[in-house]
């Protein structure tokens, strides 16, 4: 009986050990896609598509669905490739040391294969289910993020400006998905997200400057010890963002309520950036970061809910 009992208990113990391991691996694959970033990507893609569909005169729910699926897969693939290339550097930073590759929950080959699969499937979905223009913009977004921005992070502080390009292309993918083309309205959406990123990421770079320095990333605060240049760039881009945020009304993408709302949230963003410039410290940087999390979603929501007046 003792032998039989042991034979029954051992498999149960093995299963108990396997479940956490399997759950950990699944969580690792999910983490490779950087879900929070993917969610922001999908939000901007959705807004671009909804505005494009509205411009074309009607909703296109299936096109929106396939655009979101394809874009989300490509974004997840790009994040996995990014973590593959930065796995050694991530292990040196406290905020990234628990990612799947530095922690050892997944192997580099698994991350690379997973990222490649997501990217190819995502591009295929966009080509077949949406249109080639949306697929082409998604491919450029992937290539510029993985093969230009990622290596530049250890070489020049201009990496933030370069990385803002693929970061601002998701609404263009959405617009192209709905219209089959990339027009001036799509570039207006691009500029909004492009300029918004600078105060956002510079605040993050300031808050985590020691981590970035330790890993060898060339962020602006690494050559700006007192933060004066970082804060000045944050304020200048917040100021440039204000007139750009008003462009959708002038281009016939949104109405007067959007104009007023975009003006107010942009002024608030400027005030927070000015406080960071006036007093460079952790409190003001966190306030600016918080304002960035308010500004973009509010602007995008206003774009969707306030169409221009007919006629």
Image: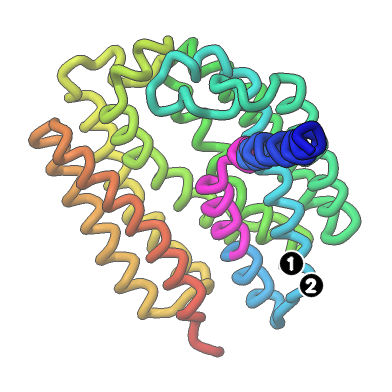
Q: Secondary structure at mark 1?
A: helix
x 41%, y 42%: residue: 197
* Residue 267 drawn above or below residue 255: above
Q: Are marks 2 and 1 in contact (CB under 8 Å)?
A: yes
- Residue 213 locus on image (x, y percent): 35, 13
Please tell me the numbered disc located at residue 65: 1
Q: Secondary structure at mark 2?
A: helix
* Residue 46 drawn above or below residue 31: below
- Which of 187/210 is in front? 210
Indicate left or right for 294 with 160 as reference: left
Indicate left or right for 121 with 159 as reference: right
Can residue 49 be seen from the camera position used here? Answer: yes
Q: Mark 2 — residue?
A: 62
36 is within the stretch colored magenta: yes
- Which of 290/31 is in front? 31
Binning the other alpha carbons within 10 Å of mark 1 as few (below 14), some (14 to 19) or many (20 upward) gives some
* Residue 180 drawn above or below residue 92: below
Can residue 141 be seen from the camera position used here? Answer: no
Q: Which residues are magenta?
A: 28-46
Question: Magenta segment, principal secondary structure?
Answer: helix
- Quadrant where the N terminus sits is top right
x 58%, y 48%: residue: 38
- Residue 114 locus on image (x, y percent): 76, 34
- Which of 18/203 is in front? 18
Q: Quadrant of residue 130?
A: bottom right
Binning the other alpha carbons within 10 Å of mark 2 as few (below 14), some (14 to 19) or many (20 upward) gives few
Indicate left or right for 187 with 280 as reference: right
Q: Quadrant of residue 109?
A: top right
């Amino acid at each position: 009986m003792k032998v039989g009992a042991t034979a029954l208990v051992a498999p149960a113990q093995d299963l108990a050990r396997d479940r956490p391991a399997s759950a950990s691996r699944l969580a690792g694959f999910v983490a490779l896609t950087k879900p929070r970033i993917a969610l922001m990507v999908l939000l901007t893609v959705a807004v671009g598509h909804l505005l494009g569909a509205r411009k074309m005169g009607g909703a296109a729910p299936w096109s929106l669905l396939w655009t979101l699926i394809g874009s989300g897969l490509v974004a997840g693939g790009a994040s996995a490739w990014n973590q593959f290339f930065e796995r050694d550097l991530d292990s040196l930073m406290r905020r990234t040391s628990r990612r799947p590759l530095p922690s050892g929950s997944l192997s580099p080959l698994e991350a690379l294969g997973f990222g490649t699969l997501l990217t190819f499937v995502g591009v295929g979905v966009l080509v077949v289910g949406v249109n080639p223009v949306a697929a082409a913009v998604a491919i450029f977004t992937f290539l510029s993020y993985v093969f230009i921005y990622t290596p530049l992070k250890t070489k020049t502080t201009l990496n933030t400006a370069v990385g803002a390009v693929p970061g601002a292309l998701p609404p263009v993918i959405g617009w192209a998905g709905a219209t089959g083309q990339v027009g001036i309205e799509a570039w207006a959406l691009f500029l909004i997200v492009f300029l918004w990123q600078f105060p956002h990421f510079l605040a993050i770079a300031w808050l985590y400057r020691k981590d970035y320095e330790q890993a060898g990333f060339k962020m602006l605060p690494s050559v700006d010890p007192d933060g004066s240049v970082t804060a000045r760039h944050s304020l200048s881009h917040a100021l440039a963002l204000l007139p750009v945020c008003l462009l959708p009304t002038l281009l016939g993408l949104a109405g007067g309520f959007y104009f007023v709302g975009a003006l107010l949230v942009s002024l608030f963003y400027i005030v927070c950036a000015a406080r960071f410039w006036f007093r460079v410290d952790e409190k003001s940087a966190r306030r600016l970061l918080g304002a960035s999390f308010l500004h973009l979603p509010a602007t995008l929501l206003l774009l969707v809910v306030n169409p221009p007046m007919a006629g």
